[in-house]
Amino acid sequence: QITLKESGPALVKPTQTLTLTCSFSGFSLSTSGLAVGWIRQPPGKALEWLALIYWDDDQRHTPSLKSRLTIIKDTSTNQVVLSLTDVDPADTATYYCARRPDYYDSRGNPVVFFDYWGQGILVTVSS
Amino acid sequence: QSVLTQPPSVSGAAGQRVTISCTGSSFNIGEGYDVHWYQQVPGTAPKLLIYSNINRPSGVPDRFSGSKSGTSASLAITGLQAEDEADYYCQSYDSTVTDWVFGGGTKLTVL
């Protein structure tokens, strides 16, 4: 059974660094092809992909936030940590972590979608 | 403004068929990138509904189907049920923003 769960602070002050942890079970991030990503959703708004880390430590970040985002993995503890620096009220959102499965298209290109999601954690940025 | 455009809302009577469109461009769907669909019941996490345009994960009813043509994709739901009332999001890759992108979401109301 595959599960993911986000943890971290519910409230962060502006300009601080937000650090979230995704703890997962049922798979290993040392397995070829797998990845874990972070997606957020401001209240009442659409989903926004933030970052992705692959089994081989390859990382992708959304360009608009790249300078503020860090994603790391710890395969020994089955955790992925996302850090977002210099937060602003606009960063208030529910943050989800999710698994990207090992899947490729007919041309052999990796395809990114998310088959298992955590329950999400609401983070409010306010002084 | 997402590069993938979805209608804000659709509705249909129980038992009927509805479709939700996801319109992109030659830099995402039209460039051949796969489209994926998620269902999000309010207050819960998104759930994968369709991956790579037409594929259903195990456990997703065959009332849900996906298609793709040109720069657009569609999600069709037949035999609408009250439990289908949710927000639906499409997702793909866009080469101009070099980013995985979600559509703005569509709220489905079952009348």
Image: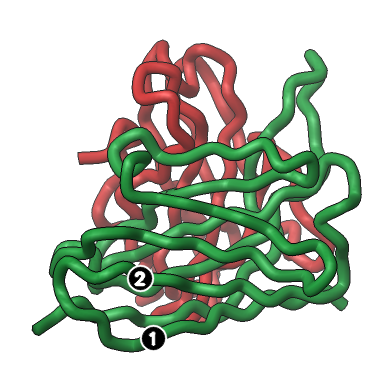
Chain colours: A green, B red
Give how far across and how far down residue A76 sits, in percent: 84, 68
Front-lying residue, B85 or B95? B95
Label 1: how many residues lie within 10 Å, few (<14), some (14-19) or many (20+)? few
Position of A76 relative to A9 (above/below): above
How far apart are the two marked residues, 2 and 1, measured between alpha carbons? 8 Å
Are labels 2 and 1 on one chain? yes
Label 2: how many residues lie within 10 Å, few (<14), some (14-19) or many (20+)? many
Mark 2: which secondary structure?
Answer: strand
Give the labeled residue for mark 2: A18
Mark 1: which secondary structure?
Answer: loop
Give the labeled residue for mark 1: A9
Q: Residue at x 62, y 68 (%)?
A: A117
Looking at the figure, which quarter contains the N terminus of chain A? bottom right
Q: Image quadrant of residue B22?
A: top left
Q: Chain of mark 1?
A: A
Which three-letter amino acid code belongs to the residue tagged 1? Pro
State which tag comes first along the sequence, 2 or 1: 1
Give how far across and how far down residue A9 sits, in percent: 38, 86
Q: Residue at x 78, y 40 (%)?
A: A56
Residue B64 appearing in the image:
no
Give how far across and how far down residue B80 sits, in percent: 53, 68
Which three-letter amino acid code belongs to the residue tagged 2? Leu
Q: Residue at x 27, y 67 (%)?
A: A42
Looking at the figure, which quarter contains the C terminus of chain A? bottom left
Front-lying residue, B42 or A122? A122
Front-lying residue, A84 or A94? A84
Query: Are the residues flagged by discs 2 and 1 in contact, CB closer than 8 Å?
Result: yes
Q: Image quadrant of residue A58?
A: top right
